[in-house]
Amino acid sequence: MPDLGKIILLTALFPGLSANVLAQTDDIETLDTTVVQAASEELKQAQGVSVITEEDFKRRPVSNDVSELIKTMPGINLTGNSSTGQYGNNRQIDIRGMGPENTLILIDGKPVLSRNAVKMGRSGERNTRGDSNWVPPEAIESIEVIRGPAAARYGSGASGGVINIITKKPDVAGGSVTVQAEIPENSLEGGNKRADVILSGPLSERFSHRTILNYNKQEGDSPELNRDATVEGSNTAAGAEGVENIDFRTLLRFDQDDINTWELEAAYSRQGNEYAGDNAFQGVDNAQSQLYIGQETNVMRRKTISGTHRGDFDFGDSFSYIQFEETDNTRLSEGLAGGTEGRFNTETGETVTIMLRNLTAKSEWNIPLELFGKSQTMTVGAEFRGERMDDPSSLQAGINVADGVVIDGTDIAAEDRDPHSSAELYGVYVEDNIMLTEDVMLTPGVRFDHHSEAGSNVSPSLNMSWQSTSEVSFQAGISRAFKAPNLYQTNPNYVYTTRGNGCPVDYPSQGSGCSILGNPDLEHETSINKEIGVNYVGTDNGISAGLTYFHNDYKNKIVTGNTAPIYVLDGGNADTYVQIFQWYNTPEAVIEGLEGSLLIPITDDIEWSTNATVMLESEDKETGQPLSIVPDYTINTQVAWSVTEDWELVASAQHYGETESPTASTTSGAVIENPEPREAYTIVNLNSVYSYKNIDFTFTVKNLFDKTILREGTQTNAGANTYNEPGRNFLVSATYHF
């Protein structure tokens, strides 16, 4: 391991050593008290930052996946990673239209990387639910949603933003037991049952613990759910598949003294699906889908162990950790060698396991200073991420070429190709919170990263806030963010093969179809993220409001297939030529939009809040296609009424504007005939929360007016109608606190 990696790991493992070094530094004047908060904390006050609290979870209870609530924040939608509509109901968190792959998910500040174990298809889509479902809602203290320039400090994968799920601390002795059921009115939709137990409290004067145990069962939708919406001559699209969750998480904390706090945490989660017939291109009516509907066709197992140190020293504070994460992704084998993408290999019925191992370490220090007559707090940090994948799945496809033909860097026979791939990422960063005047705060920063496969990247940032009056403030920011290519994209041993359907329209099959290889020469995806906004916080009336404009210039997005092949190989005769393509960097995309929020206390007991997002532009400049299938605008509104001290009624609504349809296939570039946009629609929910002694009761009607939205298919015939919106359903839950 390079010296930099050793330094980072030593810093994370032995923060006390680093503390001694800093304590001996004499050339700066440290303050006795923190006059200016840390840059990391200041950036949480930026325009593009929202916080979800425990109270929000009570007001808008979720079935299981916390993305249900996160999607109600400004700038957030649930979508796939491209405009294909493949696996449409497996929607993931999409921040400001940048796609799920540019959303970094953290649990207690530590990255969650399990979805990277799911094979990336040629459209850039992964058949995954994402990484927002590893912690049950009752175990969450808050969720930080960080968008725009403030996210640049988190490094690779945060170009869109960051979701930081913060779990409850073991500070108070006690716990809770929750049982919940969700019953759909439509018998073709799957119901949900969930139960969890949380225990926490001191074990001795200095030791405390917290343990979380969760079980959830989400039933899959019926294959008949979308039958009425099926376009004539097309296969019926699948509804949402089910999932069975088992989660166990335990934490031991040692409060060594007033300065040092140590935590050791271990977690295990299992997510197994209930197949509902979905695949990349075809619906539920083909034989392969029918054979496995209702069965478990994939299982994700995530295991982590981490050690964390928090320090509160005379000269500043620190946060350091090291985490090992292992994901086992076991799936029914797909017929990749010429078969339709996503279609199961029914000839064997065998499963294949992709194993992903990640080691991450980070150390961050916040040091208050007085420099050049200005009060400030400097944040310095270093981070290491190492990933290794064992992927026999992507080696199943052979390349049908004549004897003696060699593709650079790739052996022809699948059994001769190495299933292992790996990469290391090293990062260092510095930020400084500078109080220029009593009203103006300036936060410059710069981050340097080196990726073992894609090279180096520099990410500068500059954020500024101005408190113009006691009630009005202005904020602005600009940053350069990046995302390193994943192991599927850089691995030259990755092969996807198609008989011809996957060939670009400009380079049709010449007899033996097309193959796509990984590309070890890929560059980082980059973006220049800008935002500017104004906020109002009333000192007397309790009203708060904000408006933000954001603009992202997205460059070097990694795509595949729609450029000239790198090889055209003779497959043995004139009618069996094989075209070989690679992942490549596309030139440019532009995203811009507006976010607004408003909170008004109507009375002492009634509060109205709303937010809105308007997408002004989201377009790949090379293809003219939208980057993600997201509405033109979104409005989330809520009225909360505290009827009594123990009883609260909440009415909420989500209005989604028209969703633009792609006009061409992401995989082949072929024109989509008669592309259909998704019309605007509104979902209304009612929730009642009642507390009796130590028990919280919740009764919720989701989609009160039964505005059912059906999925019409995949990219080839559905336009933007690529996912279901469940109809009216009823959720009941009870939580006992002790």
Image: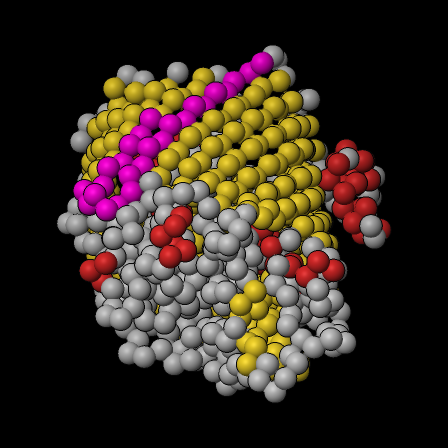
Residue 109, position in %: x, y? 57, 42
Q: Please name the predominant secondary structure of the magenta segment in the image.
A: strand
Query: Does residue 721 lie above or below 636 as drawn?
Result: below
Q: Which residues are magenta?
A: 179-203
Say whether residue 608 is left or right of residue 251. Answer: left
Vertical relation: 175 (above or below) 687 = above
Residue 608 horizontal/vertical position (percent): 24, 46
Front residue (pair 62, 126)? 126
From the viewer's perspective, is 713 left or right of 669? left
Instruction: Answer whether residue 513 is magenta in the image.
Output: no
Write down the quadrant of residue 692 in the picture: top left
Q: Which residue shows up at 64% across the image and 28% down it? A: 264
Q: Is residue 585 above or below residue 208?
A: below
Look at 76% across and 43% down and name the residue there: 9
Q: Is residue 472 visible?
A: no
Q: Residue at (41%, 55%) from the top-left corner?
A: 288
Q: Residue furthest top?
A: 204
Residue 609: image x %, image y %? Answer: 27, 48
Above/below status of 95 relative to 728: below
Q: Which sits in the foreground, 684 or 390?
A: 390
Point out residue 303 in the picture as x, y percentages from the top left corner. 60, 36
Q: How many dots with numbers?
A: 0
Q: Quadrant of the C terminus?
A: top left
Q: Residue furthest left?
A: 705
